[in-house]
Amino acid sequence: MTSPSNQPSESPRPRVVIIGGGFGGLNAAQALRDAPVEITLLDRTNHHLFQPLLYQVATATLPPSDITAPLRSILRHQKNVTVLLGEASGIDVTHKTVQVKGQPDLPYDYLLVAAGARHSYFGHPEWEALAPGLKSIDDALEIRRRFLMAFEKAEEASDEEDRSRYLTFVIVGGGPTGVELAGIMIEIARQALREDFRRIDTARTHIILLEGGPRILPAFPDSLSLTAKKNLEDFGVEVRTGEMVTRIEPDAVWVGDERIGARTVFWAAGNAASPLAKSLGVPLDKAGRVEVNADLSVPGHPEIFVVGDLALVLQRGKPVPGVAQGAIQGGQTAAENIRRSLAGEARIPFRYFDKGNLATIGRDRGIADLRGLHLSGRLGWWLWLTVHILFLIGFRNRASVLLQWAISYLTYQRSSRLITHIDPPQGVPEAANTGP
């Protein structure tokens, strides 16, 4: 067996290195279950994260264990996979190795890069300390800490103006993450927390959702976007579109010349691809994504595939959206093309099948765009619940999430309202703390 460059491989079987254990990387590994290859799955965490429910960890609805599953456990019966805990720091395309921080390089015959993306602050990296985004479990726990600590600080405050700033939350970005955060935060503040405090009325909590574009949820049809906006406003969220953030301070957000007093800001406004893409030495778009070939390979390197948020794939003139279903399908297509290359067969182009978009706005309110079929209200909400339960990995996760959701629905309570540390975590500037 020879490698893609027709040079003999030192391994008895071709070596496939997969960077990232998210939807794209995990599905690629599983699709190669019976392939005659040796797979190394490298990830800087030991778990697969069901990212669509990450906001529910950030809002104390679910514990982290309900939306994660250990990668080793998922792949324990797949004998051709080795899982390594480590962080890829670079890719040497000449020598076909992946550089890993503090560990030996990993040689490959085929490489699949599914390293994902982080939040983008549009040229203002200093805002991250003041407005955390939501991409990982650590992000979710920090958002949960700031959200719950804001009420504790409001309870302590003796000045009415200062108390108002603690009870004002600004969410930047009107995509699914921002909308879902806004909807659940207002419900928690006005229902779950209402009888817990003595000096403050949590019903006075003010949630402001800022979106720079003309409407929220731009990936959805206009009618569903308008429905979502009305739902949020019915719940008490202030939705402001066409509003660009120009400055963030420890106790305020600036929109143009307007200063909004707020101690707590959350970021859901954009993505920046993993910097790992730069080491591939190929053209990148403004967001840092790799402009891949039709078969998801990197131009000039047929042995390297890029999938998920890191790949720019155009179909019908539009980029494939950076959502879970795109990463899953991309991982499966890349795996199939590795199989075909090993068999000496022609590769297939990636064809994205859009199964539709779902979003939950709040209690009994959801929207669904299912290839032209538009649903909203309670029906959209129940469909959202069903789909997310079905896609969770592992029976225990599904059973636990169902139980937590049932308790929350019936009692309005959130079982994961834990503040595990009062001070900001190490490395977070003091200015980012929600304290005075």
Image (cartoon, rainbow, N blue to C red):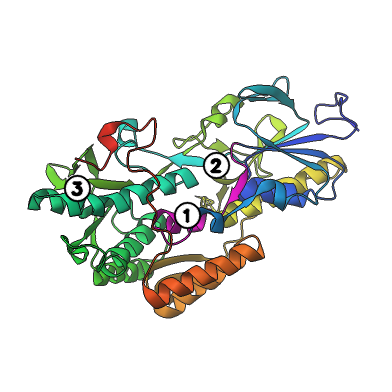
Give the numbered dot on residue 410: none
Counting from the top left corner in percent of width and height, residue 316 is at 55, 54
Under mark 3, the amino acid is: Ala
Q: Which residues are magenta?
A: 44-62
For the point 35% across and 71% down, the residue is 223
Q: Quadrant of the N terminus?
A: top right
Counting from the top left corner in percent of width and height, residue 364 is at 39, 76
Ranked by sequence position, the earlier of labels 3 and 2 is: 2
Where on the picture, by quarter, is residue 215?
Answer: bottom left
For discs 1 and 2, the disc positioned in front in the rendered view: 1
Where on the picture, by quarter, is residue 10?
Answer: top right
The answer for how far apart the CA atoms under marks 3 and 2 are is: 31 Å
Ranked by sequence position, the earlier of labels 1 and 2 is: 1
Is residue 135 in view? yes
Q: Is residue 60 located in the magenta-colored stretch of the structure?
A: yes
Q: Secondary structure at mark 1?
A: helix
Q: Which residue is mark 3?
A: 262
For discs 3 and 2, the disc positioned in front in the rendered view: 3
Task: Work out whether 20 lies above or below 240.
Answer: above
Q: Which residue is mark 1?
A: 54
The answer for how far apart the CA atoms under marks 1 and 2 are is: 15 Å
Counting from the top left corner in percent of width and height, residue 116 is at 54, 42
Ranked by sequence position, the earlier of labels 3 and 1 is: 1
Q: Which residue is mark 2?
A: 116
Badge 2: residue crowd in 10 Å (few <14, some 14–19, many ≥20): many
The answer for how far apart the CA atoms under marks 3 and 1 are is: 24 Å
